[in-house]
Image (tube, rainbow, N blue to C red):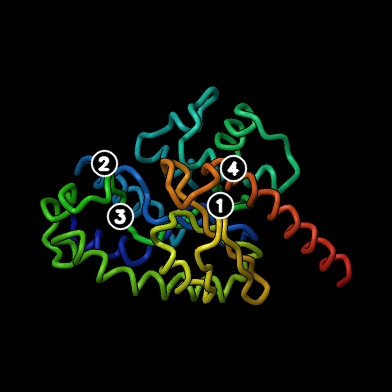
Amino acid sequence: MLDDTLLAQYTKSFFGYGNIKARLWFVGMEEGGGGTIDEVAARLAAWDQRGRPLVDDVAEFHHAIGQRHWFEPGAPTQSTWRQLIRATLLANELPVSLEAIRDYQVQRFARLGGDVASLELLPLPSTSTRPEHWRYAEWSALETLASRDSYRQHFLPLRIARLQELISNERPSAVVFYGVTYQAHWEAISGAKFGASELPRAESVGSTSFFVLPHPTAGPSRAQVKRPQECFESVGLALREVNLRWRAAVHES
């Protein structure tokens, strides 16, 4: 069984990777992984040993849990990160190629002192969203983890409120949500109404631009005209304009 005291703290306090002070945030539904109890226990232990941070350095954390291969020369590009990085490179007017994406993943993606934060709505890694694949009921005695439904019902309002607070405090220039089926939650976090227009969808609230995109690994959908990669490219170009406006405002001040 997992250490339930530590697990409860992790679910309450850990939100992902990168620099919470960055102007660009990505927010997904939940982290992949968590296929075995040993992997989850390693994640909990690493988070504990690294000081139980709100966000961590993605490379250092994965080194600590024995998943160094994502951050070594010649690393495979991770399927979700690949599109987040594509948008980031375009936003910063940098070349976009497989090698450029690989280099950014290895050297810069979601680092504590870097230029993006990669956060999650739900706290626990999972290999599937299907209720029958929920494993935490076997690994923990916490009532909130007895089923995926009880997990969602308990944590969604808490995590939405915390993400609202973080955005209010840190004021990122742009927040990119991915996973269209979670749009109601993205609207609750942002205070925006994205409607049902063609993806990507965009709204601004105060000084922050918010975007809704499909998940990077999503398959084709009847309601989705653009492929996920095209959506991330479109948002990368939109983020370039956000950057230009930010630079102009800084220059004027």
Structural crowding at the residue carrying mark 4, measured as other residues with C-alpha within 10 Å and reported as few (<14), some (14–19) or many (≥20): some
The residue carrying mark 4 is 230
Q: Amino acid at mark 1?
A: Leu
Q: Nearer the viewer, mark 4 or mark 1?
A: 4
Task: Tell me whether the residue at label 4 lies in contact with that at label 3, contact meaning CB atoms closer than 8 angstroms.
Answer: no
The residue carrying mark 3 is 124
Q: What's the CA distance linking mark 1 and mark 3?
A: 21 Å
Q: Residue at x 52, y 54 (%)?
A: 213
Check the picture and name the quadrant holding the C terminus.
bottom right
Q: What's the CA distance linking mark 4 and mark 1?
A: 28 Å
The residue carrying mark 1 is 112
Task: Tell me whether the residue at label 4 lies in contact with that at label 1, contact meaning CB atoms closer than 8 angstroms.
Answer: no
| Residue 250 - label | none
Q: Amino acid at mark 2?
A: Glu
* Disc on the earlier residue, 1 or 3: 1
Secondary structure state at the residue bearing disc 1: loop
Q: Amino acid at mark 4?
A: Glu
Secondary structure state at the residue bearing disc 3: loop
Relative to 106, is 93 above or below? below
Task: Tell me whether the residue at label 1 lies in contact with that at label 2, contact meaning CB atoms closer than 8 angstroms.
Answer: no
Q: What's the CA distance linking mark 2 and mark 3?
A: 12 Å
Structural crowding at the residue carrying mark 1, measured as other residues with C-alpha within 10 Å and reported as few (<14), some (14–19) or many (≥20): many
Structural crowding at the residue carrying mark 3, measured as other residues with C-alpha within 10 Å and reported as few (<14), some (14–19) or many (≥20): many
| Residue 39 - label | 2
Q: What's the CA distance linking mark 1 and mark 2?
A: 23 Å
